[in-house]
Image (cartoon, rainbow, N blue to C red):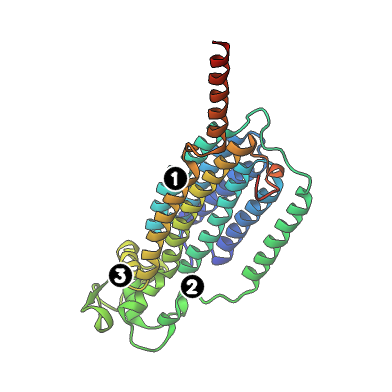
Amino acid sequence: MEVSTLTNVAFWGASAMTLGFALIVVTQRDVFRAAIALAGSFLGVGILYFVLSAEFVGVVQILVYVGAISVLMAFAVMFIQDVTLGSRPVKGRLVGAAVAVLILAAVAFTAVNTDWATMDDITDPVAIAALTEGYVEIGTGDDATVAITAPEGTTQLVVENGGVLVDSTGALGVLLIREYVLAFEIIGLLLVATLIGGLLLMRNPGPDSEAAAEEKADADAEAAGSEASV
Amino acid sequence: MTIENVLLVSAALFALGAYGVVSRSSLITVIMSLELMFNGVVIAAVAFSRFTPSAALLSNDPITAEAIRSALTGHAFAIFIISVAAGEAALAFALVFAMFRARESIEITDASAMKH
């Protein structure tokens, strides 16, 4: 399925942005600059999702990665990074580069040499119409049937949309709370566990901790000393 | 833009992230590279959703609403991976803070023991 020139330009532009900033992230010595470049790379990936007709995923990418994780990285750098030290390359990096190139070669070989099924393989006119012109569901659960909202027999829209589901956001919402409802709930549980774990790790050392005990011992010794001098 | 192109970009991002994980000395940069790897995987999931039809759409059975929605399985995977990655990033930074508190350093070579 051919895509328009504009889509191609957007795709290659977003790809160049993503990979260029990613290269800066893994080569930059200054960790704060790496964090800024990381935000740029995430933004490029977000644009890629829009180009790939995944609008909701693109919005989530920008909200979660560009909005939240990048800020988290920047805060972490400001709190703890020794700026003068930076992020030096380590000794085994040539081996790492070799492994990375091997991974790239293996995936590239597989991607190019596999005969992928395409959207053109769909022959059912109802499926094509539902994907490209929108559909409505009648009934619920296993009895649900599909009705096509636009008249059948028009092939023009099929070519333009390239087999992409129109209005993917609504259908994705239904997918998440029907087919994947268990995973959806488990993700909620996971996030709560993450929250509690983060709080546990980040909390101030309590009165029973080693540092506090040491401080208390010092204070006691001092008090004893001053008593003795009296 | 074909599925091969998108998969190549995804693989390149994953490989760059993998290189970053093993080649940098600061734990923060290592976590950044991990996030790049996550992103590479999600691009692949979305690309498959965009370019390849699901088995339910190719079969000769009557098309159901479920079959239509199965075209978006890759998007659902993307959402789940992003959620897990966000939780992972938050927890990873909590661990880095804990290590910094204990050792006054976040060099990867100082993290060679599980207990201090």
Helix, strand or loop at label 1? It is helix
Question: Do marks 1 and 2 share a subunit?
Answer: no
Residue A68, by quadrant, is: top left
Residue A199's mark? 1
Q: Chain of mark 1?
A: A
Q: Which residue is mark 3?
A: A133
Residue B52's mark? 2
Question: Do marks 2 and 3 share a subunit?
Answer: no
Name the residue located 78 percent from the left edge and 49 percent from the top edge: A92
Q: Chain of mark 3?
A: A
Mark 1 neighbour class, 10 Å CA radius: few under 14, some 14 to 19, many 20 or more: few
Q: Are the residues at dot 2 and dot 3 in contact (C-beta closer than 8 Å)? A: no
Q: Amino acid at mark 1?
A: Leu
- Judge whether residue B1 can be spotted in this image: no
Distance between the alpha carbons at the discs numbered 3 and 1:
48 Å
Tell me if B28 is positioned left or right of A177 in this view.
Answer: right
Residue A178, by quadrant, is: bottom left
Q: Nearer the viewer, mark 1 or mark 2?
A: 1
Q: Is residue B57 above or below residue B48?
A: below
Q: Amino acid at mark 2?
A: Thr
Mark 3 neighbour class, 10 Å CA radius: few under 14, some 14 to 19, many 20 or more: many
